[in-house]
Image (cartoon, grey):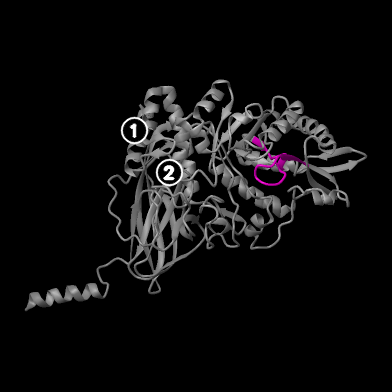
Amino acid sequence: MIRKLWLLAIVFSFTKGYGQRSADLYQVDALEKIFKERAYFPPLQDDTIRAAAGETASIQLVLRANRPVRGLSSRAVCLPGNASKLTAKTGWVTYVPVGRSYTPASKDLLRSVSGYFPDPIVDDTLLTLAQGEINPLWVSIPIPATTAAGIYKIQVSVNGLVNGKKERFLRTVPVKVYPVKVPETSLWISNWSAHFSPVSLELLNKGNKVTLYSPLYWQLLKVHADIMAAHNQNVHRIYAAWNTKYTLQNGKYTFDFANFDKEAELFERAGALKRIEGGHLAWRSGAWDDPFFVEVPLEDNEATRKLKPGPNPSAYLYGMRSVLLPVTDARAQNFLDQFLPALKAHLAQKGWLEKYIQHISDEPTAKNAPSYVAISSYVKKYLPGVKIMDAVLTSKELKDGIDVWVPVLDVFHKDYTFYQELQKSGKEVWFYTCVGPRGNYANRFIEQPLIQTRYLHWINYKYGATGYLHWGLNYWGGRDPLRDDASRDRGKLPAGDANIVYPGYKKLYTSIRFEAMRDGIYDYELLKMMEKKDAARAKGFVNDLIMNFNAYDNSIRYFRKIRKQLLEALAM
């Protein structure tokens, strides 16, 4: 009888919730995308985070509420015990809805029952979870280059209210710092910012207008520079033609480069300007394969209003009008004949000429390649030694027009022999991803495994591409990108193609994809270090994971094994 009563007491206590923690904190790999419907979190075989000095380490935990919990906040500290001490920052991983899946789909495409995918990392929000709900927590630990080797214990605490009472949930994660120092990153990285777009900056100002070149404009631009520098973005696109104040009288231009200088200096101070990527000088005159026309500032009058308008958003500030004209037009040549020498002289005066590269126009095709090459040749007359750079959708037709080649990844794959020959001749070769390639190619789409975003820079190493470009840092499609459909233009572009950061009030939120991209850039540097020590072994590490341009080993556990071996080899 006593035994039966004892068993009944146990059953009663569990049905009332006694003996059960109000919430559990699980550690999961930072390369896993955790969906809301996930219920099982097995212990990690190896819970140690491994990093070199100079990197940023990432920890991902998952909080599961066994009872309703409100007002959840988080904090991470480095426990005493080492000569050095690390700092840590936490943020909740939040979810964005994804519209229709892109096609052709990757064989590795991830599926979500709810249609919501984890991506933004929000560091200023209190979370509420219903009973049974889960939510990932992200911890970033910048490791200074001077950090002593050793194991550092990061204690993560989550505080919340359960039935109105404060409760605290703890997890301690070891971070092993190897006696390896990552040098300043050398891989050229550019994510184009849409800060010239009114919508982009308004979203950082609660939807309110931000006047071009106002104090608030520069304050918000610094927000962009800081997050880009923190994620190893070291090439910034600045439109010299857009940031210049013009006057035109009797065919003679004057040029004021003050706003160009202010933007460049802002990014330079932030540490995100190893190279200046001069914005495009020309645009399509009509349809996709139509010839390129030069963008020219002219006086705003009845005659110029009949010409095809250019996209310059600042020309109106100075009573000018931006128009598109063929390079053979005398007005286009008059502008280029004065603007390009003035730009060159100014860059030289500022000490920027050696780091300046110039765009002509974006994604030339085989059909409009002749107009591209004609404009490029004209520019080269006045900017000798300045490299011409562009993202390209074709190869041999542009051979005489480009110095820094940036083919889309599948074109790089298809024409790899051509690009190998360019590299042998001293040309720079990067690659880019955009709306494509799709299928099984690595990209930064939200529906792909996170490891494939990191693998982009292993592909850089394997195929000798010294840079990576993407068009979409922050081209948000909706008025609330943290809650709107993540597929810009209602599914026309794959989710995550148009942005890799999210807007807050006078701040930008990172994403798990941006963190993975940054970590891949560090991987590239470790592989370059390994190459100097043992080139064959560096090649072996890459070949273990990257079989081809569009074939990879996506096992997170195997990736961690290879990266551990890489760090150990460098530490010897």
Which residue is under mark 1? 565
Res. 3 image quadrant: bottom left
Q: Is residue 23 above or below residue 455?
A: below
Which residue is under mark 2? 440
Residue lying farthest to the right in this orientation: 250
Residue lying farthest to the front in this orientation: 367
Q: Amino acid at mark 2?
A: Asn
Q: Is residue 318 left or right of residue 77?
A: right
Residue lying farthest to the left in this orientation: 1
What residue do we see at 69% from left, 34% from top? 372
Please tell me the numbered disc located at residue 148. none
Q: Position of residue 445 (x, y in %)?
A: 48, 49
State the extent of the magenta-drawn residues as a range: 276-295
Viewer-proximal residue among 109 and 38: 109
* Label 1 neighbour load within 10 Å: few <14, some 14-19, many 20+: few
What residue do we see at 69% from left, 56% from top? 198
What residue do we see at 41% from left, 23% from top? 535
User: Where does the N terminus fall, quadrant-wise?
Assistant: bottom left
Q: In the rendered structure, are the residues bearing label 2 and label 1 in contact, judged by CB atoms less than 8 Å apart?
A: no
Residue 419 on the magenta span = no
Q: Secondary structure at mark 1?
A: helix
